[in-house]
Amino acid sequence: MVRSEAPPRHVPPASGDGLVALVEMAFKLTWLSFKLKAYLVVWAVLFPMLSLPILLTVAAGEQGGSSAATAVGMASLMVLAGWRLRHPGSFHRLVSGRIWKRWRRWRTYRQPWRHLCAMHGLTVVLNDRVSVPKLHRVRVGYVSDAVTVRMLYGQSIEDWQRVSDALGHAFGAMSVRVRALKPGWAVIDVHHGDALASVVPLPQTPCSEGIGVEALTAGVTERGDRWQVRVRGRHILVAGATGAGKGSVVWSVLAGLGPAIRAGIVHLWVVDPKGGMEFGPGQALYQRFEHDPGDGTLRLLRDAAAILTSRSDRLRGVTRSHTPTTEEPLVLLVIDEIATLTAYSTDRKVRAEIEQLLGLILSQGRAVGVNVIAAVQDPAKDVLPLRQLFPTRIALRLTEPSQVAMVLGDSARDRGALCDRIPDTLPGIGYVVEEGSSDLVRVRAFYVSDDDITRLCKDFLPPGRLLPAREQASAA
């Protein structure tokens, strides 16, 4: 005989359990109410231009009824609309722009942060617990954002730099660069606009202070700051494809040196082996000018090496750094398309001596005031074997991704220096790396026109020099 089991009887919960559930629900509702009020207070403080009209409308409704509330509300809307039409800049800065920044901070970064880190392999699972890098602070700008992150133990800055391109797509940005802030901390620079899209004309007066050679303003950075270039104690390499704006970079530096050239503490020795087409119009500013890639250039380099040797013998044991004066000026060699001298010369004997002299000047000239600014199209090692002797390197638009590493270093492209992606419609834009720093700075040089060069020749003529007859006639 099969015995059937009775169905389980429903046991009502104890009265104590129901009381606990009610207490928990009441606590949650109270906590949610408190959070809501706190959020409202915070938003009222953050956006007083909106909260004050709302409070006035509510107060008018309590005192005068719905008609009074409607009148006050409509008047507030009219004031805000008039403000928006008459002064859109201040309205955007104080009202709509602040709301947009708040929304972007939450929607783009804080809300998807956990999932974004997981999808890009930036989380760590330990003992069934998922650790996520801490999103410490987000500073939103109209062109770029700065996201400060506390990395997990065991992570390095290279781990984040390797996924910078993928992060850029996730953030909907034009480009992303990751840099170290301090041990364990990283800053993700997210560029969602381009502050350098517009041409930056050369100022009528140099932005550089005084007549020194320490900090010359050659353009602007993507953050809107001055791009300052140091010439004293530096050699500068400018690499870029045809039409990338190498001439603008060099001319921007020379424009910043204008007061020092006029004072006689900087002498320009210029080599333009392409027939003088790029730098020929500025001959009035130069102490020496050569457009012959052979014997003429060889004589100029021999004389520069002789000055270097003489100064080294005189300053040895006296000082470790040369100070330019009118009696002993800084000699600045400007070489356009240096590969014409080091790789494309058909005379092997001349080429070998030029490479030897350049190696001497680049390795020993900085301390004695013999400096070099060189431009090159192809930065390959067989074309420019001396590229590592340039402490300041500027990479404009390049034709191949591998060339970025040749100019700025092996990991430069992973850190955001996408020189091969710079459009040919944006000449003068590039990335700069300085000796002793791993930071990459995106910059745009001033645009220097033919009229600007003519003006520079008239305004900063070196002592004892005369304008060419053609320029004297145009000035008259």
Image (cartoon, helix red, strand yellow):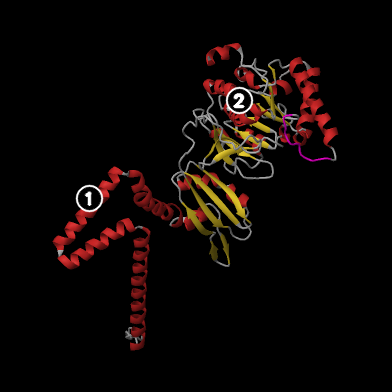
Give coordinates of residue 163: x percent, y percent.
56, 47
* Residue 1 in view (yes/no): no
Pointer 2 or 1: first along the chain: 1
Does residue 321 belong to the magenta stretch? yes
Circle 1: residue type: Met
Q: Tell me the crowding category of disc 1: few under 14, some 14 to 19, or many 20 or more residues within 10 angstroms, Cα based.
A: few
Question: Circle 1 sits on which residue?
Answer: 78
216 sits left or right of 25 in the view: right
Q: Residue at x 34, y 64 (%)?
A: 40
Picture layout, residue 108 above or below residue 314: below
Who is closer to the viewer here, 40 or 207?
207
What's drawn in magenta, residue-wise?
318-326
Q: Are marks 2 and 1 in contact (CB under 8 Å)?
A: no
Q: Residue at x 81, y 18 (%)?
A: 349
Question: Circle 2 sits on which residue?
Answer: 460
Who is closer to the viewer here, 476 or 224?
476
